[in-house]
């Protein structure tokens, strides 16, 4: 499924006119003509218009602009984001020059569309850890409470106000530590590894009938989980009316079926087959060099 068919960045002339006009409000914020991100990033790559397929990939090394492109598209389309957008005083001005087109049958981007980043995964993992650490602290407190109630003599019930404490002590004397604690303890979140949790994070966020921008989803994922994520994305695009725009340098994601790949390391930016990309060639040459060690 294609919702977003084209996206146009600011032209070199538009960027030049803006920088020469240089609004005084921005100048007062101590920004120089050389530090006008995201201006001046893409003209030297001869990148102006992007055309999208059900799966489109931005490939490139650090600083190539692939995450910036996702950020620009997401903000222009006003997509939901799992983390705050990376902004500068010039972003709003830059977005005024950007244009986009929907596919012929599409009137608007689905409301559930979103940008999902690896930073959001890390926040999710920290939330799980914080919750589980809180559960662990509560468990220790309940153990102490159990031993205290178990070892001390039963108190005489002298009034109704003491009934709850009396009942708790009676339960402690009649129950095992495990049973007493389990009834009072909030549940820990599933004890998955970071990679497994990251995989669940992405797959839970992706629903049917929407556009998703994924920023380096391979982070924290093992090779096996990356291949599972690839299958999930391919099936979501093919059967569940999803469109994906992905920033990655993972060979597993780059090899997705029918994906259009923009190589942001090349000047000018061009479409390439995944087998032509430098990062993939490095992997290929490495395994080729050691092929005699594989049975």
Image (cartoon, grey):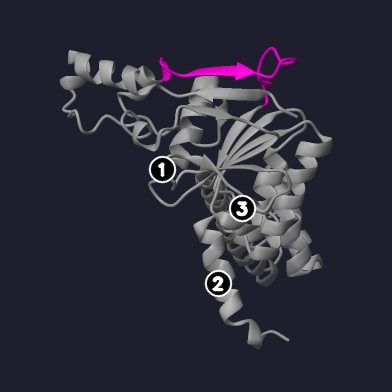
The residue to which callout 3 is attached is 274
Dot 3 lies on which element? Answer: helix
- Give yes or no for residue 105 being in the magenta stretch: yes
Which residue is depicted at the point 24% across and 20% down?
Answer: 19
Q: Position of residue 258 (x, y in %)?
A: 72, 43
Q: Which residues are magenta?
A: 95-112
According to the image, label 2 marks what residue?
A: 285
Q: Quadrant of the C terminus?
A: bottom right
Q: Earlier in the sequence, mark 1 or mark 2?
A: 1
Q: Label 1 vs label 2: CA separation?
A: 24 Å
Q: Secondary structure at mark 2?
A: helix
Res 267 label: 1
Q: Main secondary structure of the magenta part?
A: loop
Does 10 sit left or right of 40 as displayed? right
Give the residue drawn at x 60%, y 17%.
101
Residue 138 visible within the image = no
Residue 278: percent from left, percent from top: 50, 58
Using the image, determine if residue 54 lies above or below residue 261.
above
Query: Residue at left 76%, top 51%?
Result: 231
**Camera sees residue 11:** yes
Callout 2 crowding tier (Cα within 10 Å): few <14, some 14–19, many ≥20: few
| Relative to 69, residue 254 above or below | below
Quadrant location of the N terminus? top right
């Amino acid at each position: 499924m294609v919702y977003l068919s084209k996206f146009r960045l600011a032209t070199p002339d538009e960027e030049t006119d803006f920088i020469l006009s240089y609004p005084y409000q921005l100048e007062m914020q101590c920004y120089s003509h050389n530090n006008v991100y995201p201006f001046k990033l893409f003209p030297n790559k001869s990148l102006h218009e992007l055309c999208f397929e059900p799966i489109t990939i931005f490939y490139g090394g650090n600083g190539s602009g692939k995450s910036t492109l996702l950020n620009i598209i997401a903000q222009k389309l006003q997509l939901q984001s799992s983390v705050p957008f990376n902004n500068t005083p010039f972003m709003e001005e830059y977005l005024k020059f950007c244009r986009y087109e929907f596919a012929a049958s599409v009137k608007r981007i689905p409301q559930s569309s979103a940008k999902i980043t690896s930073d959001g995964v890390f926040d999710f993992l920290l939330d799980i850890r914080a919750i589980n650490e809180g559960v662990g602290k509560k468990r220790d407190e309940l153990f102490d409470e159990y031993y205290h109630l178990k070892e001390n003599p039963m108190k005489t019930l002298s009034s109704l106000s003491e009934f709850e404490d009396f009942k708790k002590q009676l339960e402690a004397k009649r129950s095992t530590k495990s049973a007493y604690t389990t009834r009072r303890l909030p549940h820990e979140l599933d004890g998955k590894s970071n990679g497994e949790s990251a995989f669940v994070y992405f797959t839970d966020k992706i629903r049917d009938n929407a556009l998703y921008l994924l920023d380096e989803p391979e982070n924290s994922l093992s090779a096996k989980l990356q291949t599972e994520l690839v299958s999930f994305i391919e099936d979501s695009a093919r059967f569940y009316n999803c469109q994906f725009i992905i920033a990655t340098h993972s060979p597993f994601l780059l090899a997705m079926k029918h994906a259009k790949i923009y190589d942001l390391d090349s000047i000018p930016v061009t479409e390439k087959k995944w087998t032509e990309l430098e990062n993939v060639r490095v992997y290929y040459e490495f395994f080729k060099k050691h092929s005699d060690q594989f049975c």
